[in-house]
Amino acid sequence: MSADMQMPVLAPEPTPEKKRRVSRKIIALLVVFFLVVLAVVFFRSSLSKVNEIRIVGNDLMPAERIGQASGIAAGDQFFGVDPGKAAARIKELGIVDTVKVSKHFPGQITIAVEEYKRVAFQLGDDGSNSIVLADGSVVPADGRSVPLDRPILTGWRDDDPLKLKLCRTLATIAPALLSDISEIKPEPSAAYEDKIRMFTRSHFEVITTIGWLPDRIPYLGVIVNQMKEKDTNEGVIRMMEQTRAGDFATELSAGTDTQDGEAAKSGAGAGTSPKSTAGQSSKTSQNKAPTPTKKPTSTPTSGTKATPTPTPGGKPNAIG
Protein backbone atom coordinates (compact mmCIF):
# COMPACT_ATOMS: atom_id res chain seq x y z
CA MET A 1 0.00 0.00 0.00
CA SER A 2 1.30 3.38 -0.91
CA ALA A 3 2.45 5.60 1.81
CA ASP A 4 0.55 8.51 0.28
CA MET A 5 -2.81 6.84 0.78
CA GLN A 6 -4.64 7.65 4.00
CA MET A 7 -7.31 5.74 5.80
CA PRO A 8 -10.82 7.38 5.68
CA VAL A 9 -11.91 9.05 8.88
CA LEU A 10 -15.28 7.83 10.11
CA ALA A 11 -17.83 10.38 11.45
CA PRO A 12 -18.23 10.20 15.17
CA GLU A 13 -21.26 8.35 16.46
CA PRO A 14 -24.07 10.90 17.33
CA THR A 15 -24.62 11.22 20.98
CA PRO A 16 -27.97 10.25 22.51
CA GLU A 17 -28.71 13.91 23.33
CA LYS A 18 -28.29 14.90 19.68
CA LYS A 19 -30.56 12.07 18.61
CA ARG A 20 -33.27 13.30 20.97
CA ARG A 21 -33.03 16.84 19.58
CA VAL A 22 -33.43 15.61 16.03
CA SER A 23 -36.39 13.49 17.03
CA ARG A 24 -38.08 16.46 18.69
CA LYS A 25 -37.60 18.61 15.57
CA ILE A 26 -39.11 15.93 13.38
CA ILE A 27 -42.07 15.54 15.71
CA ALA A 28 -42.62 19.33 15.84
CA LEU A 29 -42.57 19.57 12.06
CA LEU A 30 -45.07 16.72 11.81
CA VAL A 31 -47.37 18.42 14.35
CA VAL A 32 -47.22 21.72 12.49
CA PHE A 33 -47.90 19.93 9.24
CA PHE A 34 -50.96 18.16 10.60
CA LEU A 35 -52.26 21.38 12.21
CA VAL A 36 -51.99 23.18 8.90
CA VAL A 37 -53.80 20.35 7.19
CA LEU A 38 -56.54 20.38 9.85
CA ALA A 39 -56.90 24.18 9.60
CA VAL A 40 -57.27 23.99 5.83
CA VAL A 41 -59.84 21.25 6.14
CA PHE A 42 -61.73 23.12 8.90
CA PHE A 43 -61.93 26.43 7.08
CA ARG A 44 -63.09 24.67 3.94
CA SER A 45 -65.80 22.80 5.81
CA SER A 46 -69.25 24.01 6.88
CA LEU A 47 -68.16 24.11 10.53
CA SER A 48 -66.25 27.34 9.96
CA LYS A 49 -69.10 29.11 8.18
CA VAL A 50 -72.24 30.87 9.32
CA ASN A 51 -75.05 28.40 8.76
CA GLU A 52 -77.86 29.96 10.86
CA ILE A 53 -78.88 33.55 11.66
CA ARG A 54 -81.55 33.93 14.36
CA ILE A 55 -83.31 37.29 14.75
CA VAL A 56 -85.42 37.72 17.88
CA GLY A 57 -87.35 40.58 19.49
CA ASN A 58 -88.47 42.31 16.30
CA ASP A 59 -92.11 43.12 15.61
CA LEU A 60 -92.34 46.18 13.38
CA MET A 61 -89.01 45.76 11.62
CA PRO A 62 -88.95 42.83 9.15
CA ALA A 63 -86.33 40.20 9.94
CA GLU A 64 -85.08 40.33 6.35
CA ARG A 65 -84.27 44.01 6.67
CA ILE A 66 -82.42 43.47 9.94
CA GLY A 67 -80.42 40.65 8.41
CA GLN A 68 -79.46 42.75 5.40
CA ALA A 69 -78.46 45.69 7.59
CA SER A 70 -76.23 43.45 9.72
CA GLY A 71 -74.06 42.58 6.73
CA ILE A 72 -74.00 38.92 7.80
CA ALA A 73 -75.05 36.19 5.41
CA ALA A 74 -75.12 32.42 5.48
CA GLY A 75 -71.81 31.05 4.26
CA ASP A 76 -69.69 33.86 5.72
CA GLN A 77 -66.68 32.91 7.79
CA PHE A 78 -67.91 32.42 11.36
CA PHE A 79 -64.77 33.80 12.97
CA GLY A 80 -64.74 36.76 10.62
CA VAL A 81 -68.03 38.19 11.93
CA ASP A 82 -67.59 41.34 14.06
CA PRO A 83 -70.61 41.58 16.44
CA GLY A 84 -69.97 45.24 17.31
CA LYS A 85 -69.91 46.44 13.71
CA ALA A 86 -72.99 44.38 12.85
CA ALA A 87 -74.93 45.86 15.78
CA ALA A 88 -73.93 49.41 14.79
CA ARG A 89 -75.21 48.88 11.25
CA ILE A 90 -78.57 47.60 12.55
CA LYS A 91 -78.87 50.53 14.98
CA GLU A 92 -78.77 52.92 12.02
CA LEU A 93 -82.20 51.66 10.90
CA GLY A 94 -83.85 54.04 13.39
CA ILE A 95 -86.68 51.85 14.66
CA VAL A 96 -84.39 49.69 16.78
CA ASP A 97 -83.48 50.94 20.25
CA THR A 98 -80.95 48.32 21.37
CA VAL A 99 -79.15 45.51 19.50
CA LYS A 100 -77.03 42.60 20.72
CA VAL A 101 -75.23 40.31 18.28
CA SER A 102 -73.79 37.08 19.72
CA LYS A 103 -71.94 34.12 18.16
CA HIS A 104 -72.55 30.49 19.10
CA PHE A 105 -70.23 27.82 17.75
CA PRO A 106 -70.67 26.11 15.44
CA GLY A 107 -72.01 28.54 12.89
CA GLN A 108 -74.92 30.23 14.69
CA ILE A 109 -75.41 34.03 14.93
CA THR A 110 -78.14 35.46 17.16
CA ILE A 111 -79.36 39.04 16.70
CA ALA A 112 -81.53 40.23 19.60
CA VAL A 113 -83.23 43.59 19.02
CA GLU A 114 -85.47 45.81 21.13
CA GLU A 115 -87.59 48.29 19.24
CA TYR A 116 -88.59 51.73 20.47
CA LYS A 117 -91.84 51.96 22.41
CA ARG A 118 -95.09 52.59 20.58
CA VAL A 119 -96.34 55.93 21.84
CA ALA A 120 -99.10 56.93 19.42
CA PHE A 121 -100.78 56.40 16.06
CA GLN A 122 -101.47 58.69 13.16
CA LEU A 123 -103.76 58.63 10.16
CA GLY A 124 -102.54 59.24 6.63
CA ASP A 125 -104.33 61.33 4.04
CA ASP A 126 -105.54 58.09 2.46
CA GLY A 127 -106.94 56.86 5.78
CA SER A 128 -104.10 54.41 6.42
CA ASN A 129 -102.92 53.83 9.97
CA SER A 130 -99.32 54.27 11.06
CA ILE A 131 -97.55 53.56 14.33
CA VAL A 132 -95.50 56.34 15.92
CA LEU A 133 -92.51 55.29 18.02
CA ALA A 134 -90.60 57.01 20.80
CA ASP A 135 -87.86 58.16 18.43
CA GLY A 136 -90.40 59.81 16.14
CA SER A 137 -90.28 57.03 13.54
CA VAL A 138 -93.52 56.37 11.68
CA VAL A 139 -94.13 52.75 10.66
CA PRO A 140 -97.12 51.62 8.55
CA ALA A 141 -99.51 49.47 10.56
CA ASP A 142 -99.75 46.99 7.65
CA GLY A 143 -103.02 45.46 8.75
CA ARG A 144 -102.18 45.39 12.46
CA SER A 145 -105.09 46.16 14.73
CA VAL A 146 -104.89 49.58 16.34
CA PRO A 147 -105.48 49.32 20.12
CA LEU A 148 -107.25 52.05 22.03
CA ASP A 149 -104.53 52.50 24.63
CA ARG A 150 -102.56 55.04 22.59
CA PRO A 151 -103.57 58.50 21.33
CA ILE A 152 -103.80 59.51 17.69
CA LEU A 153 -101.61 62.41 16.55
CA THR A 154 -103.27 64.84 14.14
CA GLY A 155 -101.99 68.03 12.58
CA TRP A 156 -98.29 67.25 13.12
CA ARG A 157 -95.59 67.46 10.46
CA ASP A 158 -93.20 64.52 10.37
CA ASP A 159 -90.21 66.90 10.49
CA ASP A 160 -91.60 68.97 13.36
CA PRO A 161 -89.07 68.92 16.23
CA LEU A 162 -91.93 69.38 18.70
CA LYS A 163 -93.43 66.11 17.44
CA LEU A 164 -90.20 64.33 18.35
CA LYS A 165 -90.26 66.03 21.75
CA LEU A 166 -93.85 64.87 22.26
CA CYS A 167 -92.98 61.28 21.28
CA ARG A 168 -90.08 61.17 23.73
CA THR A 169 -92.30 62.62 26.45
CA LEU A 170 -95.09 60.10 25.84
CA ALA A 171 -92.55 57.28 26.14
CA THR A 172 -91.85 58.34 29.75
CA ILE A 173 -95.53 58.26 30.80
CA ALA A 174 -97.19 55.08 32.04
CA PRO A 175 -99.67 53.67 29.47
CA ALA A 176 -102.44 53.63 32.10
CA LEU A 177 -102.25 57.43 32.37
CA LEU A 178 -102.70 57.78 28.60
CA SER A 179 -105.57 55.34 28.25
CA ASP A 180 -108.20 58.12 28.31
CA ILE A 181 -106.40 60.29 25.71
CA SER A 182 -107.81 59.72 22.25
CA GLU A 183 -106.16 62.50 20.23
CA ILE A 184 -103.37 65.06 20.55
CA LYS A 185 -102.98 68.02 18.22
CA PRO A 186 -100.61 71.01 18.27
CA GLU A 187 -102.02 74.35 19.34
CA PRO A 188 -99.05 76.71 19.67
CA SER A 189 -99.53 80.24 20.95
CA ALA A 190 -97.33 83.30 21.11
CA ALA A 191 -96.43 82.43 24.71
CA TYR A 192 -96.12 78.63 24.45
CA GLU A 193 -94.87 77.11 21.21
CA ASP A 194 -95.29 73.58 22.60
CA LYS A 195 -98.91 74.02 23.70
CA ILE A 196 -101.15 71.10 22.80
CA ARG A 197 -104.83 70.23 22.93
CA MET A 198 -105.80 66.70 23.91
CA PHE A 199 -109.18 65.05 23.51
CA THR A 200 -110.26 62.39 25.97
CA ARG A 201 -112.60 59.46 25.57
CA SER A 202 -114.49 60.84 28.56
CA HIS A 203 -115.51 63.86 26.38
CA PHE A 204 -113.16 66.46 27.85
CA GLU A 205 -110.57 68.62 26.13
CA VAL A 206 -107.26 69.16 27.89
CA ILE A 207 -105.01 72.14 27.20
CA THR A 208 -101.42 71.91 28.38
CA THR A 209 -97.87 71.94 27.02
CA ILE A 210 -95.50 69.14 26.13
CA GLY A 211 -93.14 70.28 28.87
CA TRP A 212 -95.81 70.15 31.59
CA LEU A 213 -97.47 66.97 30.38
CA PRO A 214 -95.52 64.48 32.57
CA ASP A 215 -96.31 66.49 35.73
CA ARG A 216 -99.94 67.26 34.90
CA ILE A 217 -101.20 64.00 33.40
CA PRO A 218 -101.28 62.04 36.72
CA TYR A 219 -104.00 64.41 38.00
CA LEU A 220 -106.21 64.26 34.90
CA GLY A 221 -108.28 61.29 36.07
CA VAL A 222 -108.93 62.94 39.44
CA ILE A 223 -110.11 66.16 37.82
CA VAL A 224 -112.37 64.31 35.37
CA ASN A 225 -113.97 62.41 38.25
CA GLN A 226 -114.53 65.65 40.16
CA MET A 227 -116.20 67.22 37.14
CA LYS A 228 -118.48 64.24 36.68
CA GLU A 229 -119.43 64.37 40.36
CA LYS A 230 -120.66 67.89 39.64
CA ASP A 231 -122.72 66.56 36.71
CA THR A 232 -120.35 68.15 34.20
CA ASN A 233 -119.82 65.40 31.66
CA GLU A 234 -117.90 67.43 29.09
CA GLY A 235 -115.78 70.53 29.12
CA VAL A 236 -112.28 71.98 29.01
CA ILE A 237 -109.48 71.34 31.48
CA ARG A 238 -106.59 73.80 31.35
CA MET A 239 -103.46 72.31 32.89
CA MET A 240 -100.95 75.10 32.47
CA GLU A 241 -99.02 76.74 35.34
CA GLN A 242 -102.29 76.49 37.24
CA THR A 243 -105.15 74.07 36.69
CA ARG A 244 -108.67 75.18 35.85
CA ALA A 245 -111.63 73.13 34.67
CA GLY A 246 -115.06 74.05 33.43
CA ASP A 247 -117.62 73.63 30.71
CA PHE A 248 -117.08 74.77 27.13
CA ALA A 249 -118.66 78.17 27.77
CA THR A 250 -115.97 78.81 30.36
CA GLU A 251 -113.22 78.22 27.82
CA LEU A 252 -114.79 80.59 25.30
CA SER A 253 -115.11 83.37 27.86
CA ALA A 254 -111.65 82.85 29.34
CA GLY A 255 -109.68 84.41 26.49
CA THR A 256 -107.20 81.62 25.94
CA ASP A 257 -104.49 83.43 24.00
CA THR A 258 -104.70 86.52 26.21
CA GLN A 259 -104.35 84.45 29.35
CA ASP A 260 -101.40 82.58 27.92
CA GLY A 261 -99.63 85.82 27.16
CA GLU A 262 -100.31 87.28 30.59
CA ALA A 263 -99.22 84.05 32.31
CA ALA A 264 -95.94 84.00 30.41
CA LYS A 265 -95.16 87.60 31.39
CA SER A 266 -96.17 87.37 35.03
CA GLY A 267 -95.20 83.75 35.72
CA ALA A 268 -98.68 83.17 37.11
CA GLY A 269 -101.13 80.53 35.99
CA ALA A 270 -103.66 80.98 33.26
CA GLY A 271 -106.41 80.33 35.81
CA THR A 272 -106.67 80.07 39.53
CA SER A 273 -109.74 77.96 40.15
CA PRO A 274 -112.33 75.90 38.31
CA LYS A 275 -115.22 77.85 36.84
CA SER A 276 -118.54 77.45 38.63
CA THR A 277 -121.28 75.85 36.64
CA ALA A 278 -124.94 76.67 37.03
CA GLY A 279 -126.23 75.72 40.48
CA GLN A 280 -122.80 74.78 41.74
CA SER A 281 -120.33 76.51 43.99
CA SER A 282 -116.83 77.19 42.74
CA LYS A 283 -113.92 75.31 44.23
CA THR A 284 -110.33 76.16 44.85
CA SER A 285 -107.85 75.22 42.15
CA GLN A 286 -105.84 72.10 42.72
CA ASN A 287 -102.57 73.98 42.60
CA LYS A 288 -103.43 77.19 44.44
CA ALA A 289 -104.72 77.64 47.95
CA PRO A 290 -107.37 80.28 48.77
CA THR A 291 -106.02 83.74 49.55
CA PRO A 292 -106.34 84.33 53.29
CA THR A 293 -108.76 87.07 54.28
CA LYS A 294 -107.27 90.06 56.04
CA LYS A 295 -108.07 90.43 59.67
CA PRO A 296 -110.88 92.96 60.18
CA THR A 297 -109.98 96.07 62.06
CA SER A 298 -112.18 97.89 64.48
CA THR A 299 -112.43 101.64 64.84
CA PRO A 300 -113.21 102.74 68.38
CA THR A 301 -115.90 105.38 68.81
CA SER A 302 -116.45 107.63 71.77
CA GLY A 303 -117.46 105.70 74.82
CA THR A 304 -118.17 102.43 73.05
CA LYS A 305 -116.07 99.61 71.65
CA ALA A 306 -116.73 98.87 68.03
CA THR A 307 -117.54 95.27 67.13
CA PRO A 308 -115.55 94.04 64.10
CA THR A 309 -117.69 93.16 61.14
CA PRO A 310 -116.41 89.98 59.39
CA THR A 311 -115.71 90.29 55.73
CA PRO A 312 -116.69 87.47 53.39
CA GLY A 313 -113.65 85.31 52.94
CA GLY A 314 -112.38 81.79 52.62
CA LYS A 315 -114.15 81.33 49.31
CA PRO A 316 -112.27 81.65 46.01
CA ASN A 317 -113.67 83.82 43.27
CA ALA A 318 -114.87 82.01 40.15
CA ILE A 319 -113.21 82.83 36.87
CA GLY A 320 -115.30 83.87 33.98
Image: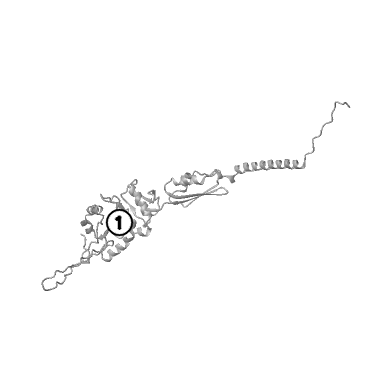
Q: Residue at x 69, y 42 (%)?
A: 28
Where residue 67 sits in the image (x, y, percent)?
Answer: 48, 46
Q: Of residues 145 and 18, which is closer to you in this image? A: 18
Whether residue 119 sits left or right of residue 68 in the image: it is left
Q: Is residue 284 above or below residue 124?
A: below
**Quick check: 4 left or right of 170?**
right
Q: Position of residue 188 (x, y in %)?
A: 28, 50
Seen from the viewer's position, the closer of residues 257 and 198 is 257
Judge whether 279 appears above or below 15 on screen: below
Q: How is the image coloured?
A: one colour
Q: Percent x, y for residue 36?
A: 64, 41
Q: Residue at x 34, y 53 (%)?
A: 152
**Disc 1 secondary structure class:** strand
Towards the viewer: 150 or 306: 306
**Which image quarter holds the C terminus?**
bottom left
The three-letter code of the residue at mark 1 reads Phe
The answer to whether residue 170 is above or below residue 81 is below
Q: How many marks?
A: 1
Q: Disc 1 designates what residue?
A: 199
Q: Does the image show residue 90?
A: yes
* Image position, residue 68 (x, y; %): 48, 44
Specify whether 81 is left or right of 286.
right
